[in-house]
Image: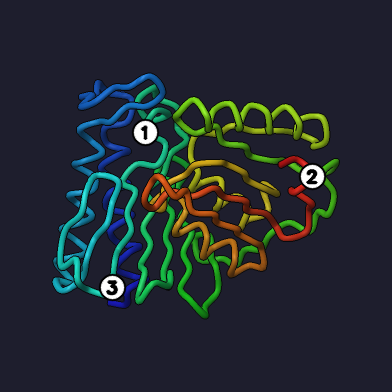
Amino acid sequence: MTDLELATHAALEAGKLLRQHFGSDTVVDEACPHDIKLALDKESQELITKILLGARPGDALYGEEGIAGNQDSERQWIVDPIDGTVNYYYSIPHFCVSIALRVAGEIVVGVIHDPMVGETWTVAKGGPALLNGQPIRCSQRTTLAESILFVGCGKDDAAMRTGIERFHRASLRARKMRMMGSAALGMAYIASGRLDGYIESRISLWDIAAGQLLVETVGGKVELTPNGDHADTYAIIASNGKIPLEEIL
């Protein structure tokens, strides 16, 4: 089984778990003003970890719910077991499983699986980006006036203020604005031509690792600026590579 096949299998199995429990009472492990953590987040990551490290026992795993495996390995699986946990908790069917593989610092595999819609995006470095086995591409739109943009607001006060200000500026220029609650699906939608751009001032690596490879593979652009005070968090600008997102920053 190739790395891409393994990641796809793990994402599909986790998706089955999430779909099985969707809409039922879920246990909240942790609640804060703008986010929650579910017991199911951990259960999903544990399932993914068992599959990935069961097949690749020498690898490392770095996920939203913790680390596992050989942390000295140059092969590191990057996992978000539920991207869109708040959506999931409120029975909003817009969330996904995101799995990427980073080898010697380079993302080489990406899988994003939406279990509710039944869509799975897959990509391996040097190969095509696919949605349910069919090739995808970014939109060809070139102006903000014809674009649909996704602006994230983050979870802390500073990131929320920045996001709201950008949303306001962009809403005066773009055709439509969206705040969707899943960065990984937002990236997948850009790669599929459904959205044209995504901006957020603070996002975690596991949210965007798989999506970055998808977007760049189909000709889009992703700019990541590290947040120095938070490890593995970034400011992100992602687009089809044609619209002038710098006009709303």
Q: Which mark is residue 247?
A: 2
Q: Position of residue 149 (x, y in %)?
A: 69, 41
First in sequence: mark 2 vs mark 1? 1
Q: Earlier in the sequence, mark 3 or mark 1?
A: 3
Dot 1 amino acid type: Thr
Q: Is residue 32 rendered to the left or right of residue 43?
A: right
Residue type at mark 2 is Glu
Q: Which residue is mark 3?
A: 75
Residue in front for this viewpoint, 233 or 7: 233
Q: Secondary structure at mark 1?
A: helix
Q: Is residue 211 above or below residue 22?
A: below
Residue behind mark 1: 85
What's the amino acid at mark 3? Answer: Arg
Q: Is residue 17 above or below residue 108?
A: above
Few, some or many C-alpha atoms within 10 Å of disc 3 (few <14, some 14-19, many ≥20)? Answer: many
The answer to whether 239 is drawn above or below residue 160 in the figure is: below
How many other residues sit within 10 Å of disc 1, few (<14), some (14-19) or many (≥20)? Answer: many
Closer to the camera: disc 3 or disc 2? 2
User: In the image, is residue 22 above or below residue 199?
Assistant: above
Labels 3 and 2 touching (C-beta < 8 A): no
Q: Residue 221 appears in which quarter of the rendering? A: bottom right
- Report how far apart the C-alphas of labels 3 and 2 lie in the structure: 38 Å
Residue drawn 76% across the image and 31% down it: 169
Q: Determine whether, in the image, residue 61 is placed left or right of residue 3.
A: left
